[in-house]
Image: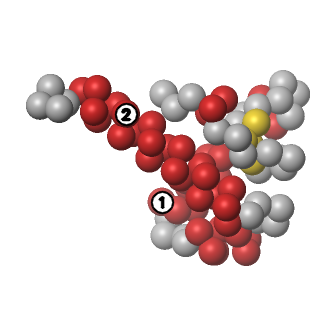
Amino acid sequence: MTDWSKCPVVESVPGKVSGAWVFKDTRLPLYVLFENLAEGATVYDFIDWFGGVEESEVRAVLEHVAKDLRSKVAYADPVR
């Protein structure tokens, strides 16, 4: 499970979007980004479609996930 508390561009506030992890200072849940990317949208499409989110914030979320996945692979790979 990704520890979103270590990603500076997101927040989870009780009572705001049911406590879901959202882009900071928005009501836009992170899962919306991943659903759109999975459906073929680009980062630029997402930014155009959902106001209030900057490219740097989207990239920070994607980099956070990539770093998390890399750490899990390194931990699980006995060859390393």
| Dot 1: element | helix
Q: Of 33 and 55, which appears nearest the observer?
A: 55
Examine the rendered structure and indicate whether residue 2 appears above or below residue 29. above
**Along the horizontal axis of the image, is 53 left or right of 71?**
right
Percent x, y for residue 74? 28, 33
The residue carrying mark 1 is: 38
**Along the horizontal axis of the image, is 39 left or right of 14?**
left
Percent x, y for residue 24? 80, 45
Percent x, y for residue 11? 76, 36
Q: Of 35 and 78, which appears nearest the observer?
A: 78
Q: Amino acid at mark 2?
A: Ser
Query: In the image, which disc is placed on residue 7?
Result: none
Examine the rendered structure and indicate whether residue 72 appears above or below residue 27. above
Residue drawn at (64%, 39%) of the image: 7
The residue carrying mark 2 is: 71
Q: Do tag 2 and tag 1 residues touch (Cβ < 8 Å)?
A: no
Percent x, y for residue 36? 57, 61
Badge count: 2
CA distance separating discs 2 and 1? 23 Å
**Residue, far front:** 80
**Along the horizontal axis of the image, is 78 left or right of 61?**
left
Q: Amino acid at mark 1?
A: Ala
Residue drawn at (69%, 56%) of the image: 57
